[in-house]
Amino acid sequence: MYLYLPLALTSVNILVPVGLGLLVGLLSGLFGVGGGFLMTPLLMMVGIPPTIAAATDANQIVAASATGTLAHWRLGNVDFKMGFLLLVGGFTGGAVGVQLIKVLKATGGADFLIKMTYVVMLGLVGTFMFFESLNAMRKAKAGSDKAQKTQQQATSEKNAGAKPSKGFMGALPIQIYFEKSGVTHSALVPVGLGAFVGILAAIMGVGGGFLMVPVMIYLLRMPMHVVVGTSLFQIMFTCVEVTFLQAYTNHTVDFVLAILLLLGSTFGAQIGTKIGKKLHGDQLKILLAIIVLAVTVKIVLELLMEPSLLLAYKGGH
Amino acid sequence: MSQTKYLYAAVILLLGLLFMADHSRAAEPMDAASSGIEKAPVTCEIIPDEVFIDSFYHGAQLKITGKSDANDEIIIKISSPPTESSLKFMGKAAGLFWMKVGDMEFKPVSNVYMLYTTGAINKIASPEERIRSLVGYDAIKAQVEITSSKGPVDKDRWFNEFIKFKEKDKVYGIHEGTVVKDGKGGFSATVDWPYQAPPGEYKVDVLAIRDGRVYAEASQKLVVKTSGMITLLSDLAFKNPALYGVIAIVIAVLAGLGVGIVFKGGGGH
């Protein structure tokens, strides 16, 4: 059965957006990412105009991240204090990023910057996560002694996290202990990192979950199970802001498409959360790394190979 | 006296009618006279001549029928009003990466252009006639002007890219041999109207061709418009965008939380 999309001005088979929503929602629940970096290109592949794809994707991420946040909150996996500070930074960075894109669009350099940011950031994050997780999994296989050692290491790391960070981050003012994550940081650290991710997210036109998750794991040293819930909490608010702005200023949120996507994504997110509980943290990380690297390779190939069509409608990144 | 009044009134009425008849006749054949094309010998009917875009719209099937001389060749042209089409074009940035590198304008071109014919257009219509009646891609190319934000362009290359782009979107197409004649002057064609064609008013021209020349033509209007929920949502999005944005967010949050509650019941977190 086909449905006509009133703002995209195109007709789609209902199963296509529902299926895409289910797939991306599954990833959302599993890894704590919004899935924007996957969904927007997938929607464009099925014929949705780029501007509609990006804005409507933000709307459906609101639903997927709301259900994911609720599921993780019930499991006690959301650090609201950390999430709020990341959000403050994210909103500020997002606003700066939008202005940056406006300037670059006027000078004609936006497209190049966006594509290059995608390749560099996805490539770096994916490669780092992949090898880091691989090493962790190899170590975990080294027998029960090692497992015990890892347990002790984790406990000592948790205890160390309760203390303020050393070096530059430890010297910053407004040190706060985040009970849920068991870490101590200056409030400026999550705000600053949130702003950095916000700028990149605005440039790339995504929620920023795939950047925020590594930042939480490697820079904020938060435990994986809290990272996923907190990331979804932060993404939900970011996408609420983006949905409203896109609907108000650009009229690019296609409500019918969003409903079809969220039909799939809300269920997908719940299923993803349940599967995630059964997987080890390193397995989750390596799976996410493989997906991120696959998207990077696809973008690189698109950049290097001559496209079949050399003309495109205006709008979108 | 009253009789004279009636006479004057009758004369004025008659003169008025004569003037109107003369005026309308003078206005109509002007085009035909200037182009040398007759209007009467070919007819055209579209069923339906209004297409409504509702929630389950996936394009429409149109039947175009008419009558002409049994020996005529027929070309049916469906097009939107000519306008300027502004697109992004791809090129290599830094000599390595393919990406959108600038804007390209094509004018005048129709956003929708479809031909249905009784045979190959280069056999049934002379080159001059094709140019004059805007039949075929060569005729469009002859009149189109292509400009780019990056300077002069290779017209042949970029016009071919334009046609490729539009054909991929199914809004351009030449369907030779698809008009069926019944041998008694009647003809018909079935048109699969693409859902990609936006709402608007389209012109359907039926050209009757004899000895390579268009000697008669008939035109009809095809209207494509939104209806029901599609119109409602589209109007809300453009006329009350703040409310539209808030509704989109509230429904997304409620849907997300609703599914979360359903899963709690069934899954037992």
Image: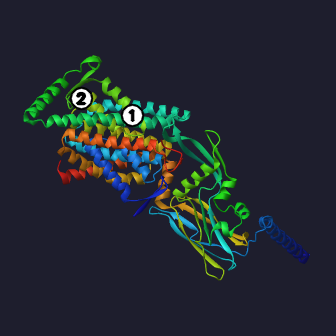
Q: Is residue B164 above or below residue A293?
A: below
Residue B197 shows up from this direction: yes
- SS category of the residue bearing label 1: helix
Are labels 2 and 1 assigned to the same chain?
Answer: yes
From the viewer's side, name the closer residue of A112 and B50: A112
Instruction: Report, in whole angstroms, how far the alpha carbon at label 2 lies from the one at label 1.
Output: 23 Å
Q: Amino acid at mark 1?
A: Val
Instruction: Tell which subunit mark 1 falls on.
Output: A
Quadrant in the rendering for residue A70? top left
Q: Residues within 10 Å of mark 2 (few under 14, many from 20)?
A: many
Residue at left 63%, top 59%? B137
For the residue pair A5 and B100, the one nearer the viewer reads as B100
The quarter of the picture where the N terminus of chain B appears is: bottom right
Q: Is residue A41 left or right of residue B53?
A: left
Q: Which residue is mark 1?
A: A120
User: What amino acid is labelled 2 in the image?
Assistant: Arg
In this view, the residue farthest toward the bottom is B184
User: In this rendering, would A265 be left or right of B95?
Assistant: left
Residue B140 at x, y percent in the picture: 66, 56
Image x and y of residue B263, in percent: 22, 52
Task: Report the residue at 41% width, 42% height from top.
Answer: A299
Which mark is first along the chain, 1 or 2? 1
- The number of numbered discs placed on residues in the rendered structure image is 2
Give residue A185's quadrant in the image: top left
Determine crowd level at label 1: few under 14, some 14-19, many 20+ residues with C-alpha closer than 10 A: few
**Residue underneath mark 2:** A221
Q: Identify the secondary structure beneath mark 2.
A: loop
Residue A69 visible in the shown view: no
